Amino acid sequence: MPVYLSISPLECVGCKICMLACTAENLGVYKPTSSAIKVVRLGEGDYVTACRNCAKAPCIDVCPTDALYRENGVVQLSREKCIGCGRCIVACPFGAVAYYNGKAFKCDLCGVCIEKCPVQKLKVTDSWDQRKTKLWNTMIEIAGDIQLGV
Amino acid sequence: MYGWTGKTLFIDLSRGKLVVGESSRENLKLYLGGRGIGSRILYESTSPDVDPYSPDNCLIFSVGPLVGTRFPGSGRYSVTAKSPLTGILGDANSGGYFGPELKYAGFDAVVIRGRAEKPVYIMIVDGEAEIRDASDLWGLDTWETEDRIRESTSPGVKVACIGPAGENLVRYAGIVNEKYRLAARTGVGAVMGSKRLKAVAVSGEGMVEAADIGRFEEVCDKASELIMEAPGYEYFSKYGTPSIVDRALLAGRISTRNRQTSIFPEGELLSAEELDSKYKVKDRACFACLIHCSNYARVMSGSKCVGGEGPEYETLVCLGSNCWNSDLASIIEMNELCNRLGLDTISTGGTIAWAMECYEKGIITREDTGGLDILWGDSEVMIELIKMIARREGFGDILAEGCARAARKFGEEASRYAMHVKGMELPAVEVRGAKGFGLGLAVASRGADHLRALVNFELIGYPPELGEKLYGSPDSVDPLSIRGKAPMVKYHEDLGAVLDSAIACKYTFFTFYTLSAELLAEALSHLTGVDFTVEKMMRVGERIVNLERHYNNLHGITRKDDQLPRRLLEEPLPEGRLKGQTVELEPMLDEYYKIRGWTSEGIVPKEKLLELEIKVKGER
């Protein structure tokens, strides 16, 4: 199942240190707009997005030079092959592909953001794990309701 | 350029002209950025006869080399202008996201002069800017303004704007960014209003480059580690500044009833735990900050849900205990109201507390207030007053002048109860129980301000040996002693000026004291490629403090103005642990001037300016 970076919008404090660490580590500059992980503040929540490594990844489909490919479940980008056409950026339904210095740039789960997150709640999540948790929580709720005679 | 962008945006609103110019390289090295650059530009461009509300006053938004990097707490910007509240140097500093965005948009500073004919706002996008019509925004509160600008431009735009208070020239109006973050003090928002400038909106996709990113990142890691491993980090990052309320209550040092006493019996209701357990939703951080001291809180008021980030310690005291108000929910509501209207909660609270005491003493009557009973702790009246102040309606028109000016309308006795220094209302700290802070407030270059010399050192309870080593007296660790306070204030002022100019939040340094000046110098060197030794960096701080003092000297500020309200000097605290305490200011002042190298009248001599390479205006 797809793996991706996640944190609860109520646990994330919106410091954007992950974005700064991402570009410093991978691009050698501080440039949040080119970060592979994004924090967006909406109302009281701080929402994090990064590549979700979709099973049928539109970015891989549209790449004309095969710069995008899958390795161990993670969508990887070859900066050598990339011609900077931007098709993957448009194709990604999450806006998770960034752009830097004439080429695409995306999350390869290098983990620097997780390491630098001051609340230490940013983590790699597996959709399957999430499903299991949700399933169990629902079942427990239903079981409780039945016991209460609802 | 590394660290800096090298560009400054000059705007003349009277002529509708915008020019992108080079930042003065010399000034960047001598004054760093932020507050330092702001003060330098203000000094060069406003003479003593310029009225703060005249088009000739300058409004400067500035960032520093650290802004936009990962250095802890570096996501801030500074606003400088001649203050309508004090008539001297004014500046304020705010966190959030606006500062870094301005840097990414390509500017070290934006210098605004003149006055627009009609309301305008400035839109800055990636190195370019334009002046846009803001007629339809005029009159809106800061939250609506930000939303409207974002709707009509792009959702990622960062906005710093004024509310009705700034438009109506309330002398302590602030500039608001991201709804809850204020460059609040000294009335910079009113200067913006006088220029008919509703907002500055910024969007930047640029970057900050370091001379040596590897080593700079290492310093950032080290700084982060030192902060996160500090004892007290966990506590402070969870509770934020409201935790200072708890500390002040324990020490019997909470400003109460316009500083008539330092004991607030219902103080527990304003404690950090109370805020955390009843109203808090989550922690919030400014850009690049790992302390995340901000608390997002909300509460129901009638059928409306109000709140947001805050209230902070200053607000809890200034609108709380100092007005005898223990209703935390009402403070959250007032905090939102001040954010929306664009008011400094410290000065707003200080002015209302003054009015409450004058009402109690019969100096202000119902006739003056238009029928309002301004009684201690009446939060509904306070909310009403805040609205009246922002609109300058009725009695609010008088309060909008600040307590010092308002008191002049009611005679000598009323002035006795006006708690201000140089015209600016006192912050929350009860200085009869923290004498280093007392000296700091008296000499601060922007009037009563606790952040110029944030001498938390004296409150932490360090061992006397450390006090002796650093400030020459073992008693300096005792908040009630006046010994060693002058050198302590000097050191905090100098390093503080560097932090305000670099810019990094003072809390990263002066809360835990685990970061050193060496570390900051190292960070600046690796970032900018300019070799900053500790001595050179601390000289930058000293230079800024002296330049600001020189500017204020030109405006007639001398020793006679470096005073505290008479109450703090003459009226001993009546109860509690601090019973009998006053501030013995004069001996501290003597010592302070001496180590600063100023005359006994508090004037910066010419030799001192020369020594610090401060180029005097009009000389080559």
Image (cartoon, coloured by chain):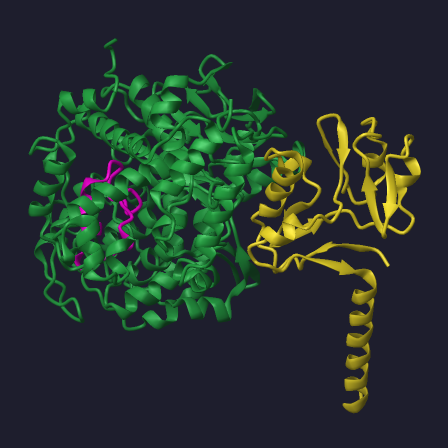
| B211 is higher (above) or lower (below) than B425 | above
Q: Position of residue B154 (x, y in %)?
A: 67, 34
Left or right: where B148 falls relative to B98: right
The residue under the point 56% across, 30% down is B208
Kindly indicate which chain is depicted in yellow in the rendered structure: A
The answer to if A2 sits in the magenta stretch is no
Left or right: where B189 falls relative to A124: left
**Magenta region:** B428-455
Q: Nearer the viewer, residue B398 or B20?
A: B20
Q: Position of residue A77 (x, y in %)?
A: 81, 38
The residue under the point 39% across, 50% down is B507
Q: Nearer the viewer, residue B155 or B101?
A: B101
Q: Quadrant of the N terminus of chain A?
A: bottom right
| B150 is higher (above) or lower (below) than B510 | above
Q: Within the image, what quadrant is residue B554 found in?
A: top left
Q: Within the image, what quadrant is residue B429 found in?
A: bottom left
Left or right: where A105 falls relative to B25: right
Q: Position of residue B611 (x, y in %)?
A: 19, 23
- Visible residue check, residue B418: no
Q: Quadrant of the C terminus of chain A?
A: bottom right
